[in-house]
Image: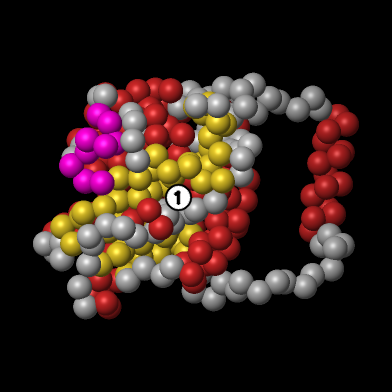
Amino acid sequence: MRVALALGSGGARGYAHIGAIEEIRARGHEIVAIAGSSMGALVGGLAAADRLEPYTEWARSLTQRDLFRLLDPKWSAPGAIAAGRFFAEVERLVGGQRIEDLPVPFTAVATDLHARREVWFQRGPLVSAIRASTAIPGVITPVEMNGRLLADGGLMNPVPIEPTAISVAELTIAISLQGARTAHERATPAREPASPTWREELVERVRRTVGRTAEPEPPTLLEQVRLSDVVGLSMDAMQGLITRYRMAGLPPDVLVTVPVGAARSLEFHRAAEMIELGRTLTAEALDAAGH
């Protein structure tokens, strides 16, 4: 069966897209169109260029120490992370391939921050399109291109189904990385008092006391990277809501949902675990849909 894939944003959880693609192909389906935002654009672009296998081998080999070297932190830049070495590896794999020449039609989705609109890359250098789509605000340095300031495609379209609408596919599969953290997670507003709990007040008093008697140590590199978790959690909250609204208007035939709690945004050293999770969840979704 001919399949169109919409691959969602969600940082390191996006390695689940690799397992999803492997499972879809293992069942004999032909992928005839791919659209992706952020990590979905990275994995989708590599798959469309037929370079996913060597990238997967490289990603599986990454350790946490390798990750710090590749992300290349730049704490004074518009984004905390330049990720130049990471994208150099992507460029090494795909070379100068252009989107319009790929074996599989591909769209990378980014966000024009000034114009507040989506940008669909369907022509031009593949690496440039991936770089723009993966620029998480406040974490990875944004991209200036053709007079536009471009950032993560997930800001406006976390699971880009629309670019695949004109494909010749018989089945549309969407992989969302914004699933509920727990089976009983609620989407309705919580009504809480604004006053802190006694535990929070105690922690604050201790913090103030310690702060008067000791000069705080500068944060370690690991602690600095973890500051990005706040941005990641904020993005997840926003994108989860956007995904629900957009899919209500254009639902896929099959939806694979990866929980947001599966991995933090920058835990790229957990590739093997995320790939296996993506394969398992995709198999379950396809079995349930009879494909």
Rendered position, 139 above or below 146? below
**Splitting the image into 4 quarters, where does residue 20 fall?**
bottom left
Q: Position of residue 283 (x, y in %)?
A: 24, 67
Asked if residue 274 can be seen in this view, the reply is no
Please report the residue visible at 33 percent of the width from the left and 35 percent of the height from the top. Answer: 123
**Splitting the image into 4 quarters, where does residue 226 fall?**
top right
Residue in front for this viewpoint, 174 or 123: 123
Q: Is residue 183 left or right of residue 220?
A: left
Q: Main secondary structure of the magenta part?
A: loop
Q: Is residue 114 magenta?
A: no
Rendered position, 213 above or below 195? above
**Mark 1: which secondary structure?**
loop
Asked if residue 216 can be seen in this view, the reply is yes
Of all residues shown, which one is farthest toward the front? 166
Q: Position of residue 1 (x, y in %)?
A: 15, 66
Q: Is residue 77 left or right of residue 62?
A: right
Rendered position, 291 above or below 83? below
Tell me where the magenta segment starts and ends, as one range: 97-105
Quarter containing the C terminus:
bottom left
Q: Which residue is mark 1?
A: 9
